[in-house]
Each structure stands twice: as structure tokens, then as C-alpha cells.
Image (cartoon, rainbow, N blue to C red):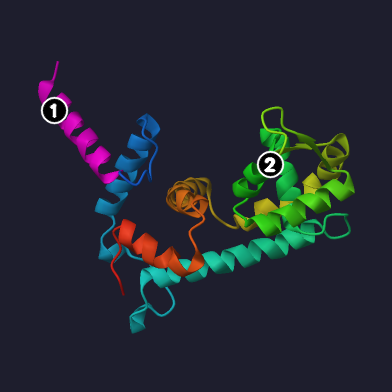
């Protein structure tokens, strides 16, 4: 046995555990592999390989560029989603996204469905109410807690979804644009990392007035 190699691996595992206190990565082999991959990517990407972004020459930060680009991409995606549901009974893209989640993951509580779609409770409740009126979802009392409502997609909801799926798939294909397969995989890794960072924070429902200060206190950020 190569004990030197074992020692190096154990050292890496200790470093992974130390740097993963905020659970940005899952505490398993997949999380460890993702951490190593991202660490290697950061090591190999020096300033000479850094891309151009608008305002870079005048000192605009990469964080500012990332934030703006994510907002732009979200708006582009919404325009394609709006086209995908035109002429249908769907009112918003959230309607079919809620149905897709119910079809994929099965029955769940209202709050589980709302959180899965990263939305506030009032907005999520309005969407669920709309879906119930359409007959696309059905709600029942939970056997564990009669105050909790379980939501399940109906046959009518599945049919409405399937009637629109061709357009929806076309919209999602367009959103990924001209990226090749390798670029898509890289983007998924990066977005998954961001999602794993933000999702636990979102689920804590921190008051808006305290959100930024709380995150800055708990995570290692340089204050601008």
C-alpha cells in the first residue's frame, strides 16, 4: 500500500471538511469530487485567462458582472417561457413549473412545493390556488397533521402539461443557446454550487432588513 498517497488523501479530506463548514458541497464522495474539481479549476485559471466583462476596464467587479448577467439570463428565459405558454390556459411560467415538480416528485405539502420553486409563501399560495381552480392539482388533508394540506397533480393537470411540453422543451433548449456539451456541464456544476450556497439561506426566511448583514457575518465575504 502506498502510505504516502493515503496520507495525502486524508490531508485533502481534512481540508475539505474544514472548508465545507457552510455545506456548500454534500458531505459524500460526490461533494468531495466537486470540491477537488473546483479547486483545480481555480488553480488553473490565472488572470491571463480571465474573460472580458462590460465595465471591467473601469474597475467593475466580477461579482457585479455575475449578478447582472444572471438577472439578464432570467429575463431572457422568461420571454421564452411566455412564448411557450401563449395560446394555452397557463397564466404564468410558474404554473407549469409547479406542475412539472409535482409530476416529477409526487405529492407534497404546499410549503414544500413553494420552497422547491424558491418563492415567498403569498406568491406560492396564489399559484396553487390558481392551479386548484383549473382542476390541475388536488389537495387533501395530511394523515399526520389535518392542518397540513397535501398537493397532488391530477390527470387533467398531466394532460395540460403534456399538451404544452413540446413548446416548453423547445424553450428550454433555446435558453442554453449555443453552448456545447462540455460548456453545459461546466455551467451546471457552477450553478449547482451557487444553488447549494443560496438555498439554505433562502430557507431560513431571514428578514429582508437583516439578510445582507447576516450573510456577511456568517460567511467569508470582503465588504466593498
Q: Position of residue 220 (x, y in %)?
A: 28, 59
User: How busy is the neighbourhood of tag 1: few (under 14 within 10 Å), some, or many (20 plus)?
Assistant: few
Q: Residue furthest top?
A: 1
Residue 3 in magenta stretch? yes
Q: Position of residue 18 (x, y in %)?
A: 23, 42
Q: Quadrant of residue 63?
A: bottom left
Identify which residue is drawn at 44% across, 64% down. 211
Q: Is residue 59 rendered to the left or right of residue 108?
A: left
Identify which residue is drawn at 47% across, 47% down. 192
User: How busy is the neighbourhood of tag 2: few (under 14 within 10 Å), some, or many (20 plus)?
Assistant: some
Q: Which residue is mark 2?
A: 101
Quarter holding the N terminus is top left
Q: Is residue 120 above or below residue 105?
A: below
74 or 201: nearer the viewer = 201
Q: Residue furthest left?
A: 4
Q: Position of residue 23 (x, y in %)?
A: 37, 43
Quarter holding the C terminus is bottom left
Q: Is residue 96 rendered to the left or right of residue 9?
A: right
Q: Which residue is mark 1?
A: 7
**Badge nearest the viewer, 1 or 2:** 2
The magenta segment is: 1-20
Q: Is residue 2 rendered to the left or right of residue 216?
A: left
Q: Position of residue 173 (x, y in %)?
A: 66, 51
Q: Residue furthest bottom?
A: 58
Question: Going from the N terminus, do you reach mark 1 or mark 2 first?
Answer: 1
Residue 12 in magenta stretch? yes
Identify which residue is drawn at 88% across, 55% down. 88
Q: Is residue 147 rendered to the left or right of residue 135?
A: left
Q: What is the secondary structure assignment of the residue under circle 2?
A: helix
193 or 137: nearer the viewer = 137
Q: What is the secondary structure assignment of the residue under circle 1?
A: helix
Distance in Å between CA atoms under marks 1 and 2: 44 Å
Amino acid at each position: 500500500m502506498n502510505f504516502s498517497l493515503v496520507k495525502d488523501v486524508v490531508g485533502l479530506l481534512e481540508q475539505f471538511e474544514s472548508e465545507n463548514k457552510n455545506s456548500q458541497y454534500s458531505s459524500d464522495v460526490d461533494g468531495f469530487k466537486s470540491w477537488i474539481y473546483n479547486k483545480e479549476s481555480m488553480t488553473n485559471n490565472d488572470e491571463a485567462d480571465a474573460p472580458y466583462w462590460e465595465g471591467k476596464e473601469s474597475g467593475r467587479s466580477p461579482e457585479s458582472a455575475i449578478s447582472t448577467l444572471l438577472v439578464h439570463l432570467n429575463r431572457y428565459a422568461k420571454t421564452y417561457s411566455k412564448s411557450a405558454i401563449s395560446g394555452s390556459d397557463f397564466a404564468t411560467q410558474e404554473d407549469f413549473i409547479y406542475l412539472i415538480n409535482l409530476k416529477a416528485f409526487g405529492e407534497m405539502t404546499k410549503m414544500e412545493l413553494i420552497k422547491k420553486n424558491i418563492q415567498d409563501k403569498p406568491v406560492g399560495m396564489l399559484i396553487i390556488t390558481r392551479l386548484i381552480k383549473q382542476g390541475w392539482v388536488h389537495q387533501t388533508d395530511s394523515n399526520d397533521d389535518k392542518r397540513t394540506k397535501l398537493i397532488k397533480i391530477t390527470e387533467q393537470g398531466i394532460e395540460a402539461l403534456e399538451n404544452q411540453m413540446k413548446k416548453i422543451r423547445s424553450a428550454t433548449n433555446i435558453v442554453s443557446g449555443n453552448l456545447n456539451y462540455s460548456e453545459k456541464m461546466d455551467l451546471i456544476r457552477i450553478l449547482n454550487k451557487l444553488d447549494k450556497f443560496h438555498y439554505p439561506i433562502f430557507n431560513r426566511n431571514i428578514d429582508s432588513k437583516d439578510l445582507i448583514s447576516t450573510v456577511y457575518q456568517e460567511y467569508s465575504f470582503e465588504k466593498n
